Amino acid sequence: MSSPMISLESLASSSAMAEMLEKPGSGGCSSSSCGSSDKPEDMDPAVWERIKDHPCYSEEAHHYFARMHVAVAPACNIQCNYCNRKYDCSNESRPGVVSEKLTPDQALRKVVTVANEVPQLSVLGIAGPGDACYDWRKTRQTFEAVSKEIPDIKLCISTNGLALPEHVDELAEMNVDHVTITINMVDPEIGAKIYPWIFYNHKRYTGIEAATILHERQMMGLEMLTARGILTKINSVMIPGVNDEHLIEVNKWVKARGAFLHNVMPLISDPAHGTHYGLTGQRGPRAMELKALQDKLSGGAKLMRHCRQCRADAVGLLGEDRGQEFTLDQIPEAVSYDPARRETYREVVAAERDDRARAKQEAKAAIEETAGGTLLLAVATKGGGRINEHFGHAREFQVYEATPEGISFVGHRKVEQYCLDGFGEDATLDGVIAALEGIDAVLCAKIGDCPRDQLAAAGLTASDTYGFDYIETAIGAYYRDVFGVGFAAASA
Ligand code: CLF
Ligand code: SF4
């Protein structure tokens, strides 16, 4: 039976989709004849096919596609000094935190409900709130039930690696194509400062012995995944003074063992979270310290820089969390999957991505021709790869670096929303300005005179001239405005 006709507008239930469908300033090319979206030049097309809709494995995909986590795996077999799963707050965004734990049946109902209502959904992840491999029975049941109902959803897990080796074959059989291992050290002496204990083979281990076992299991798991062609991402938590410089060594080890991506994330450390690090005053890195380490790592294993350190029950595009819309009390007892909206969304996105890929090429050419200096730019976006968020509504800014070689995504800065109910809070603006340390300019869809002046007083330029343009188009135009065509020749 064919699907009923669906208007594009009817898909636009989320703000990101609505903005995308407005398409103002779009270059006009909406057929797939312009190219094949934005595959990195050095990537095997078969690998691109596997990651192009995964918001974590492809920076480009994270503008369009959403992940959801189901919190079916509460048990964990190790203790990390940065984790406390007892703490819960619906506004809190960090791994290990959830509002409600689910059974596999409840998880299935939730995934189907979200798939029907969030057309961007492409990946189902199990990221705890404990360990997906240790709490294996529930992880497996959930994946089997969901993939039967929604065969095209990608399955993804995140694990500390201790129980990983015994499940690699099952992961391969179940078509789990994306696995993340959190690896914070390859030296057990450093590991002993991060992990107070592990529980392995019915026994509790502490100190260097614990870290040695964990390290060996992590390396074994990574090698087994690589041997089976599963795309493995390594997450590392950057802990200043503990493993920050050591992560250069970690990067080499995981690259040598076939890791697809390395994601270095900042330690989240707050005494209110009740973690060991929070309570003992261990600080997390500043945004510019994280960037400096990531810059040092370029040339090693390929880096992921767009991680948002999701909750274990996160729903939506990275950086937005719609989890509170889909708590158990809000989802129907019986629900069946309707693929229509996800299919239509994918058709829209395919055309949009081709158009954006062409715009990116044009922006790159403009920057090369200008041959100016380096700019670090914060952009306000709510998805679709466009500058489509007002300055005062932004809860994060995506950070791009523009150099004579081109434009690259280098991170994001979380901020408190400055404008609420039409009023801006000065104290919040001070926090936003502090979060934008090192940034040269802010590009957004709209900004009022008052915050613009206060940003200027702090040495930050803000512009809404390029509102609703593609991010790269806006950056290319801004770059030319700052440096002018032929900057290098003129300044030689
Ligand atoms: Fe989830 Fe992780 Fe899969 Fe993504 S998250 S299990 S790979 S679907 Fe993504 Fe979230 Fe960062 Fe994880 S942004 S914390 S990297
Ligand atoms: Fe927490 Fe994950 Fe560490 Fe377990 S592995 S203690 S759930 S951060």
Image (tube, helix red, strand yellow):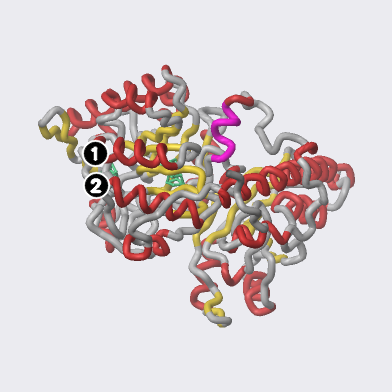
Q: Are marks 1 and 2 in contact (CB under 8 Å)?
A: yes
Residue at the image position 32 percent from the left and 60 percent from the top: 328
Residue 60: x, y in percent?
Answer: 61, 43
Viewer-nearest residue: 85 or 107: 107
Residues in magenta, as a range = 47-53
Residue at the image position 49 percent from the left and 68 percent from the top: 416
Q: Quadrant of the N terminus?
A: top right
Q: Residue furthest front?
A: 1
Is disc 2's CB within 8 Å of ligand 2? no
Q: Residue furthest left?
A: 203
Residue 465: x, y in percent?
Answer: 77, 65
Examine the image and state in which quarter residue 149 appears. top left
The answer to whether any part of residue 219 appears in the image is: no
Q: Count residues near mark 2 (Cα–Cα under 10 Å), then give few for <14, some for 14-19, many for 20+.
A: many
Q: Amino acid at mark 2?
A: Pro
Along the polypeptide, which appears first: circle 1 or circle 2?
A: 2
Compared across the picture, whether 163 is left or right of 120 comes to: left
Examine the image and state in which quarter residue 467 appears. bottom right
Q: Which residue is mark 2?
A: 74
**Helix, strand or loop status at disc 2:** loop
Residue 345: x, y in percent?
Answer: 62, 50
Viewer-nearest residue: 339 or 85: 339
Residue at the image position 26 percent from the left and 49 percent from the top: 103
Q: Count residues near mark 1 (Cα–Cα under 10 Å), then give few for <14, some for 14-19, many for 20+.
A: some
Q: Which residue is mark 1?
A: 135
Magenta: main secondary structure equals helix
Q: Quadrant of the C terminus?
A: top right
Q: Amino acid at mark 1?
A: Asp
User: Gap in Å between the C-alphas at discs 1 and 2?
Assistant: 7 Å
Residue 127: x, y in percent?
Answer: 35, 44
Residue at the image position 39 percent from the left and 39 percent from the top: 236
